[in-house]
Image (cartoon, rainbow, N blue to C red):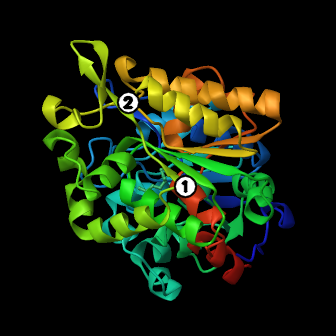
């Protein structure tokens, strides 16, 4: 991956109108319509402080169409305002009349958040040919209204979406610069062994990126939990129960053989859970893998034997990256093992001088909730993107920054 871009520091942004594409995709408490903890919004605060002499228009996404946390960005604007300590405007529009009017009126020192860019259907098509994205209505409407476009959506750098690669000229922002300065070490010359804790959702994306990293000999071990582990177990013929299976059914159908073959090839490196936890009337009940079918309910966490095994790998590694929580930590009954993994990373940082990185919206939120964010080496805004960055793949956002320098 060739990192070559024009930085926001290379141009004079004072008094200018700047469109900034960021990743503030957050963990949302849907019932109460509020953001739980957002390390990504926290990372945006110092970035905006650096741009406080510009008029900044924020463009971002939340979740994906069809998901229950696919919300408007009014709650993000509110949370940003709280953390930033100054007014943050919001317009429930992307490039229609209301958005255009609000952008035209915006003055230096002000911040405006546009609505969820993924509410605009063409956004999420993959665009290998960047010029097709450049010719979309959104780009043609918004681009002439601003002086610069900063693309700083580091957590979504692996997506060739219009708002990430479609601007005729674009520059890198403070979040990307900071992330690259820290991640350079693990991209170029990681201290070994390097282990990754893989959990949370988006199992097939994570599995494929993990495979790529094994194929390229980047990664030594992957501690698989959450839906990634369910996907692997089911591919190996284990019955994990209907409630688990139905979440990964589509990916399983298409990728079963690839997953089984990959597991066979790397079975010494792919570390799977030995026990899991279910919710037994509000209490944690530990079950074996074989019992998952009998209880026929969602398994929400890894059990104590697995925690011990994962800790051993964490304590013997020099680079530890956590990507996705091992449990559904939003629910108190399933939070314990996620916290134990974060605590083990803190211990490895202190006792072994290991480089410990927590990535992504979910695991970052879990670390904040546990009050441990400042005790690991770095909280990255990249989750899925991290796995791809590690492998050295030329990510769409990095390629676009290189090819579209002003
Ligand atoms: C993430 O949370 O990993 C990024 O915001 C990208 O989201 P996506 O996987 O829905 O594209």
Query: Relative to residue 354, is residue 20 drawn left or right?
Result: left
Residue 33: x and y in percent read 34, 29
Query: Would residue 293 be found to the left or right of residue 47 on screen?
Result: left
Q: Rounded to the nearest whole Å, what is the CA distance between mark 1 and mark 2?
A: 21 Å
**Secondary element type, mark 1:** loop
The residue beneath circle 1 is 269
Q: Is 1 left, or right, of 386 in this rendering?
A: right
The front one of 107 and 225 is: 225
Q: How many other residues sit within 10 Å of disc 1, few (<14), some (14-19) or many (≥20)?
A: some
Q: Nearer the viewer, residue 87 or 161?
A: 161
Q: Residues within 10 Å of mark 2 (few under 14, many from 20)?
A: many
On the image, the x and y values in percent for residue 350 come to 80, 27
| Residue at x-position 63% and y-position 24% | 343
Visible residue check, residue 59: no
Q: Position of residue 132 (x, y in %)?
A: 45, 86
Residue at the (18%, 31%) spot, across then down:
297
Q: Nearer the viewer, residue 94 or 267?
A: 267
In the picture of the structure, the residue carrying the numbered disc 2 is: 301
Mark 2: secondary structure: strand
Q: In the rendered view of the protein, which quadrant contains the N terminus? A: bottom right
């Amino acid at each position: 991956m060739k990192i070559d871009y024009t930085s926001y520091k290379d141009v004079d942004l004072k008094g200018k109108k700047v469109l900034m594409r960021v990743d503030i995709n957050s963990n949302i408490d849907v019932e109460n319509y509020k953001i739980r903890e957002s390390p990504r919004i926290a990372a945006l605060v110092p970035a905006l402080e650096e741009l406080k002499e510009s008029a900044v228009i924020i463009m971002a996404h939340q979740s994906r169409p069809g998901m229950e946390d696919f919300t408007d960005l009014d709650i993000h604007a509110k949370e940003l305002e709280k953390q930033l300590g100054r007014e943050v405007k919001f317009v429930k529009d992307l490039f229609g009349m209301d958005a255009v009017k609000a952008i035209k009126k915006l003055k230096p020192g002000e911040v405006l958040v546009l609505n969820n860019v993924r509410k605009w259907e063409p956004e999420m098509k993959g665009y290998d040919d960047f010029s097709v994205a450049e010719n979309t209505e959104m780009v043609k409407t918004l681009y002439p209204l601003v002086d610069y476009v900063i693309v700083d959506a580091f957590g979504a750098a692996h997506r060739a979406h219009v708002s990430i690669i479609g601007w005729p000229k674009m520059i890198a922002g403070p979040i990307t610069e900071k992330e690259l300065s820290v991640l350079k070490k693990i991209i170029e010359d990681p201290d070994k062994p390097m282990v990754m804790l893989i959990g949370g959702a988006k199992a097939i994306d994570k599995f494929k990126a993990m495979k790529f990293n094994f194929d390229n000999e980047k990664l030594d071990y992957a501690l698989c939990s959450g839906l990634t582990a369910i996907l692997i177990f089911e591919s190996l013929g284990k019955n994990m129960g209907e409630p688990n299976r139905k979440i990964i059914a589509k990916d399983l159908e298409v990728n079963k053989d690839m997953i089984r073959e990959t597991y066979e090839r790397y079975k010494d490196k792919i570390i799977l859970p030995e026990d899991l936890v279910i919710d037994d009337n509000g209490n944690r009940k530990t079950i074996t893998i074989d019992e998952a079918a009998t209880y026929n309910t969602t398994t929400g966490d890894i059990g104590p034997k697995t925690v011990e095994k994962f800790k051993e790998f964490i304590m013997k590694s020099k680079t530890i990256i956590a990507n996705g929580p091992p449990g559904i930590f939003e629910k108190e009954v399933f939070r314990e093992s996620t916290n134990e993994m974060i605590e083990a990373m803190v211990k490895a940082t202190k006792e072994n001088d290991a480089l410990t990185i927590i990535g992504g919206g979910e695991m970052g939120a879990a670390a904040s909730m546990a009050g441990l964010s400042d005790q690991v080496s770095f909280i990255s805004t990249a989750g899925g993107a991290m796995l791809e960055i590690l492998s050295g793949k030329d990510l769409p956002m990095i390629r676009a920054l290189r090819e579209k320098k002003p």
